Amino acid sequence: MYTVAGIFPDRVAAANAVKDILAMGIKGEHVDLLTPDHEEEQVARVPTAESEQPGMGRAVGSVVGGAVGIAGGLSLGTMAAASFMVPGIGPVLGIGALGAAALGLAGGAAGGAIGDKMDRALMDGLPKDEIFFYEDALRKGRSVVICLARDESEREEVRRVMQREGVESIDAARHHWWTGLRPAEREHYIGDGSDFETDEDVYRRGFETALTPEFRGRSWEQAVYVLAERDKDWSTDCFRKGYERGQRYYSSLVEQHLGVR
């Protein structure tokens, strides 16, 4: 399977892309739309699990429909919808179970065999290092479409469908996100005389590693043995600085959402 994910400026454009993807014959279980869900009555029905660690992206899902009509009367047929409260983002509406799995919500969204199936799809097809950028798009009020294509030909056709609706690629979103952060990170890094231009790639890799679901909320000491097996530069000072800075950055996003000062 090949993952194709894209960010759309609004819910309507994302839904149009999903409708066209489904028209290609791709199964609904391999397509998902994630979009901010700010309806107060829905939010009130979606409790978060108090036992979960902040930032893990796990929540109790409330299934809110089978045949779902979304913005502008667009319908995605019988694809199930669920609303979730995601730490650091707020309420998110997921139509289809694949995106819910991407945010670590498959158990609440689908349950049982479907949840297990989506977990397997996640492991097989969804790059975990992209998940933060799905979340970041949702945090900014945009919508995300994720599709698992069967082969390269189908992947290219899905990309063409998304492009017609004004998609932004995950790679582009990642680039714009870092471009926005870079001045502040550079200023912080050079404060002790370090050379940011030389160390930036490794520093950024450490920073982004801290944002992946596996490492959120894990101190350097808690993560170091796993990191030693994952990244050849794990022992460098710049990787560690980036990792610790990324942890603080993610914590601040969650705190902002919760209104903590």
Image (spheres, helix red, strand yellow):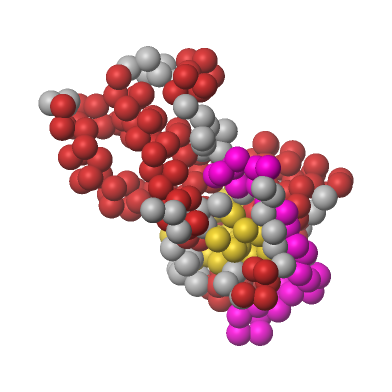
The picture places residue 76, in percent across and down from the top left corner, at 72, 72
**Residue 45 image-quadrant placement:** bottom right
Question: Is 32 left, or right, of 134 in this rendering?
Answer: right
Q: Quadrant of the N terminus?
A: top right
At 38% from the left and 30% from the top, the residue drawn is 244
Question: Is 198 left, or right, of 218 in this rendering?
Answer: left
Pick whichever, 95 or 223, lies toward us. Answer: 223
**Residue 220 image-quadrant placement:** top left
Residue lying at the far bottom in this picture: please name it.
Answer: 73
At 60% from the left and 40% from the top, the residue drawn is 53
- The reply to whether residue 167 is in sight is no
Pick whichever, 12 or 226, lies toward us. Answer: 226
- The reply to whether residue 255 is in sight is yes
At 32% from the left and 17% from the top, the residue drawn is 236
The picture places residue 71, in percent across and down from the top left corner, at 61, 80
Looking at the rendering, the stretch of residues picked out in magenta corresponds to 51-78
Pick whichever, 16 or 250, lies toward us. Answer: 250
At 77% from the left and 64% from the top, the residue drawn is 63
Q: In this view, does 138 lie above or below 148?
A: below
Residue 122 is one of the magenta-drawn residues? no
Pick whichever, 124 or 228, lies toward us. Answer: 228
**Residue 248 image-quadrant placement:** top left
The picture places residue 165, in percent across and down from the top left corner, at 50, 70
Q: Is residue 196 above or below residue 149?
A: above
Residue 70 is one of the magenta-drawn residues? yes
Question: Is 122 left, or right, of 217 in this rendering?
Answer: right
Question: Is 56 left, or right, of 249 in this rendering?
Answer: right
Residue lying at the far right in this picture: please name it.
Answer: 113
The picture places residue 132, in percent across and down from the top left corner, at 49, 46
- Which secondary structure class fits the magenta region best? loop
Q: Is residue 114 above or below residue 17?
A: above
